Amino acid sequence: MSSVKTVEVAAEDDDQRLDRWFKRHYPELGHGRLQKMLRTGQVRLDGKRAKANARLLVGQSIRIPP
């Protein structure tokens, strides 16, 4: 069984859009699936609901569902 992961934004990912970050780190995840996870609040940025166009900052935490 998979568990929820929390990943901290690294320096090389600074000022990148959240949807592009997922495409880079999880290429097997389809765009539609990512949009659904964002809409339902499964993906969170610093504990808050996130949108696909959110800009990442170094040190922020991304909650990644199983």
Image (spheres, rainbow, N blue to C red):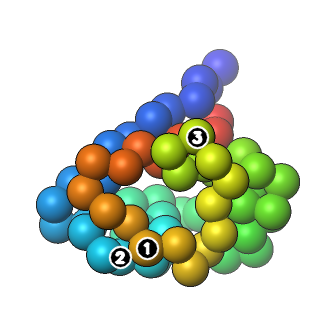
Say whether marks 2 and 1 touch (CB < 8 Å).
yes
At 17% from the left edge and 66% from the top edge, which residue is drawn? 12
Q: Is residue 47 visible?
A: yes
Q: Nearer the viewer, residue 56 or 29?
A: 56
Query: Which label is found at residue 47?
Result: 3
Residue 50 figure quarter: bottom right
Q: Earlier in the sequence, mark 2 or mark 3?
A: 2
Residue furthest toward the left? 11
Label 3 CA crowd tier, 10 Å (few <14, some 14–19, many 20+)? few
- The residue wearing badge 2 is 16
Query: Which label is found at residue 43?
Result: none
Amino acid type for the residue under numbered disc 2: Gln
Q: CA distance from mark 2 to mark 1?
A: 5 Å
Rendered view: 6 above or below 45? above
Task: Name the image quarter holding the C terminus.
Answer: top right
Q: CA distance from mark 2 to mark 3?
A: 18 Å
